[in-house]
Image (cartoon, rainbow, N blue to C red):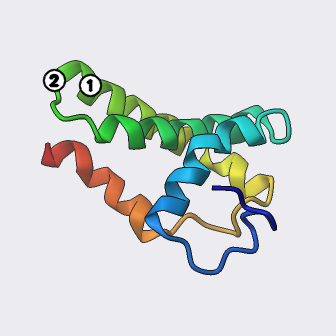
Amino acid sequence: RAFKEGVSKLKQVTGCDHRSIQQYIVGVIAGAVPLRFLAAIWALMDFRYLAQMHSFDEHVLQQLDTALQLFHTNKDSIIAARGRSEHFHVPKLELLQHVIPSI
């Protein structure tokens, strides 16, 4: 899908819209944001794709954990670059902590 007015003007976003944005977000922001900001977004995308696997082994669970830790290590750079206001109290991000133990 093409977002003619950009993604910042979206008011309601469907699952298809989310997938479209997530397919391109890392490539679109590369070079325009600090490296730690990019690492945080990349880690979230990596976590998302890994979590959709049909089966999991210890190696995949370790990769999921590494991606989540990389996000948490670098998320302050998103706030510093004003990509998010003041905090990361986002319920869906809080739920990510429970994905690995529930597998």
In the image as oriented, which residue stretches furthest toward the front? Answer: 1
- The N terminus appears in which quarter of the rendering? bottom right
In the image, taking residue 57 as reference, residue 76 lies left or right, namely right
Q: Which residue carries the number 1 mark? A: 60
Q: Where is residue 54 drawn, in percent x and y?
A: 18, 35
Looking at the image, which residue is at 35% across and 26% down? 63
Q: Where is residue 5 drawn, in percent x and y?
A: 81, 68
In the image, taking residue 57 as reference, residue 52 lies left or right, namely right
Q: Tags 2 and 1 in contact by the CB under 8 Å rule?
A: yes
Q: Where is residue 98 drawn, in percent x and y?
A: 25, 53
Q: Which residue carries the number 2 mark? A: 57
Give the quarter of the image for residue 25.
top right
Image vertical order of residue 54 relative to residue 11, above or below: above
Q: Where is residue 60 drawn, in percent x and y?
A: 26, 25
User: Which residue is nearer to you in this view: 30 or 82?
Assistant: 30
- Determine crowd level at label 1: few under 14, some 14-19, many 20+ residues with C-alpha closer than 10 A: some
Image vertical order of residue 83 relative to residue 72, above or below: below
Residue type at mark 2 is: Asp
Image vertical order of residue 48 relative to residue 65, above or below: below
Looking at the image, which residue is at 14% across and 42% down? 103
User: Which residue is nearer to you in this view: 37 or 80?
Assistant: 37
Residue type at mark 1 is: Val
- Determine crowd level at label 2: few under 14, some 14-19, many 20+ residues with C-alpha closer than 10 A: few
Looking at the image, which residue is at 51% across and 34% down? 70
Which SS class for mark 1?
Answer: helix
Q: Which mark is residue 37?
A: none
In the image, taking residue 13 as reference, residue 83 lies left or right, namely right
